[in-house]
Image (cartoon, rainbow, N blue to C red):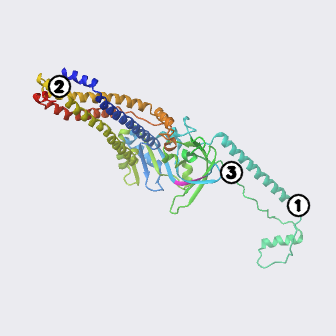
């Protein structure tokens, strides 16, 4: 009982102990905040990658992709195990290309993009594709359909051009009728029969000489009528159609929109086959794709799958089959079954995690290194505990001698200092957990306050394209941080505790 009483008394009266508590508290709070923010970024990244990809991806090794994707899907469905594990599948066709549009200044702008052909309904069934759309985000069945108002404008332009062509044809007919009623005039001298002129042409010359009307007058050539069409719709990556700039007056970031909904664009890509040839077509921007990942938002243009197949002369060919599973835990078994089903096809089959493996591993390595470095803060607090306990042992040498003279054992003396270190660790870790969770749950308000006080944004939306700092509090990580902090406090108490336990009572009583 005396051990607990002495520990509590030392905790309340020794002000140096508060320095140890504060050190442990700050170390634990820092680890919790940084760990939660890093987990938030990692979780958000994983969710985004998973939503723009799918559980399992089958992709061809070349730009020509693979033949007859419908037959491959049918083979997959015939397999009992795969059919029981797969929820839905979608076919896509990808190619590199160039997009042309008129920027805000009216100039033609060109940039490289990745053209992706999809069936909207199938693509929405294998992931969260439609959740990243801006104009059609809340619609149950998004599509490439051009908005009614914009389509009406194109149809009106088509009607006007058709009327203009019909008027030209009527005027040409009336002009021809006038020519038919007038006798032909010959601005040249007709010879009997020039050498080398065909007989049918000679008949026309003879009729003209006699003033007779030719049997089959040659009509004047007419212009080939051009019937305009309403272009296909396209969904642009958000960063293709938008860019951020800093307002020189306010210093705030604003967003410009060079490509608006309804604006025409031209996509140029290459055809398939032995000889690559450039092919192009016009499209209408109908929506924006915003996943908060620049790899997709700044590069991808989505168009109807069938239209892209025709444009690239790749009928009944595709480059990817995206698969959504009923239970992702079975992903590795599904991949193995697919590889066994298509042993000789040039297909790369993998889960989305393996496909993005280098990026995910890089984040995990960064988290591990950062946690190791931040644990050094708590280690510094441990050295503080070591120094303070050593001072306490030196100051309380006579008191230790009295306790031993009264019957306290060496183990009892050692337990006093170990319990004291444990108490410092528990109190410091407890307050650190409260402080860390409070900062984590209000991290965006804290960032706004720091920006207001310093005039500099800590989290710049122009760099990350996030609206707020993502956080993810994991109870297991908090438990590990607390146990680590308490363990460090106890470990650094061992040497002073052992030194106090080894004191001889007579020598301790004679200590000045």
In the rendered image, is residue 487 in sight? no
Label located before the other in sequence (2 or 1):
1
Q: Which residue is mark 3?
A: 228
Q: Is residue 156 magenta-colored?
A: no
Q: CA distance from mark 3 to mark 1?
A: 36 Å
Q: Which one is in front, 148 or 137?
A: 137
Quarter of the figure with residue 501: top left
Q: Which residue is mark 1?
A: 181
Specify few, some or many for label 2: CA neighbours under 10 Å numbering under 14, 14-19, or 20 or more: some
Specify few, some or many for label 3: CA neighbours under 10 Å numbering under 14, 14-19, or 20 or more: few
Q: Is residue 98 magenta-colored?
A: yes
Q: Which one is in front, 40 or 6?
A: 6
Residue 483, label in figure: none
Q: Kindly identify the residue that appears in the image at 72 percent across and 55 percent down.
A: 225
Between circles 3 and 1, the one closer to the viewer is 3
Between circles 2 and 1, the one closer to the viewer is 2
| Place of residue 155 in the rendered image (x, y in percent of width and height, measured from the top left) | 69, 45
Residue 399, label in figure: 2
| Place of residue 411 in the rendered image (x, y in percent of width and height, measured from the top left) | 14, 28
Label located before the other in sequence (3 or 1):
1
**In what quadrant of the picture does the N terminus appear?**
top left
| Place of residue 344 in the rendered image (x, y in percent of width and height, measured from the top left) | 38, 55
Q: Main secondary structure of the magenta part?
A: strand
Left or right position of 300 against 498: right
Label located before the other in sequence (3 or 2):
3
Q: Secondary structure at mark 1?
A: helix
Q: Secondary structure at mark 2?
A: helix
């Amino acid at each position: 009982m005396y051990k607990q009483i002495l520990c509590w008394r030392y905790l309340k009266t020794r002000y140096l102990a508060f320095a140890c508590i504060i050190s442990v508290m700050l170390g634990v709070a820092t680890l919790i905040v940084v760990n939660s923010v890093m987990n938030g970024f990692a979780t958000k990244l994983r969710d985004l990658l998973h939503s723009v990809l799918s559980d399992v991806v089958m992709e061809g090794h070349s730009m020509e992709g693979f033949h007859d994707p419908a037959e491959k899907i049918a083979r997959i469905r015939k397999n009992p195990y795969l059919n029981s594990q797969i929820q839905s599948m979608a076919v896509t066709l990808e190619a590199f290309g160039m997009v042309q549009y008129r920027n805000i200044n009216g100039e033609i702008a060109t940039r490289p993009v990745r053209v992706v052909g999809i069936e909207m309904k199938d693509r929405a069934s294998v992931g969260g594709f439609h959740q990243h759309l801006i104009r059609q985000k809340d619609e149950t069945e998004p599509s490439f359909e051009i908005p009614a108002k914009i389509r009406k404008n194109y149809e009106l332009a088509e009607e006007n051009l058709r009327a203009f062509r019909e008027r030209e044809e009527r005027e040409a007919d009336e002009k021809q009728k006038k020519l038919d009623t007038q006798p032909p005039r010959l601005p040249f001298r007709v010879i009997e029969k020039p050498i080398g002129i065909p007989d049918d042409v000679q008949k026309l010359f003879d009729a003209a000489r006699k003033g007779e009307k030719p049997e089959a007058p040659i009509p004047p050539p007419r212009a080939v009528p051009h019937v305009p069409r309403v272009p296909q719709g396209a969904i642009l990556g958000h960063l293709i159609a938008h860019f951020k700039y800093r307002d020189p007056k306010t210093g705030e970031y604003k967003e410009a929109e060079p490509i608006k909904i309804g604006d025409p664009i031209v996509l140029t890509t290459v055809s398939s086959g032995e000889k690559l040839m450039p092919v192009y077509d016009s499209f209408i921007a109908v929506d924006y794709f915003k996943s908060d990942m620049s790899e997709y938002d700044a590069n991808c243009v989505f168009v109807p799958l069938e239209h892209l197949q025709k444009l690239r002369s790749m009928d009944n060919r595709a480059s990817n089959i995206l698969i959504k599973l009923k239970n992702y835990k079975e992903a590795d078994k599904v991949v193995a079954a697919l590889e066994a089903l298509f042993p000789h096809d040039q297909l790369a089959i993998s889960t989305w995690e393996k496909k993005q493996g280098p990026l995910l591993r890089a984040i995990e390595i960064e988290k591990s290194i950062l946690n190791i470095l931040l644990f050094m803060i708590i280690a510094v607090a441990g050295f503080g505990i070591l120094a303070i306990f050593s001072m306490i042992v030196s100051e309380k040498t006579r008191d230790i001698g009295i306790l031993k003279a009264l019957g306290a054992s060496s183990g009892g003396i050692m337990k006093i200092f170990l319990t004291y270190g444990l108490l410092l660790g528990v109190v410091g870790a407890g307050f650190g957990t409260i402080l860390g969770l409070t900062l984590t749950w209000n991290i965006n308000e804290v960032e706004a306050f720091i920006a207001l006080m310093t005039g500099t944004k800590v989290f710049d939306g122009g760099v990350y394209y996030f609206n707020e700092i993502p956080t993810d509090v994991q109870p297991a990580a908090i438990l590990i941080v607390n146990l680590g902090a308490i363990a460090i406090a106890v470990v650094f108490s061992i040497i002073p505790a052992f030194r106090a336990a080894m004191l001889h009572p007579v020598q301790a009583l004679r200590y000045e």
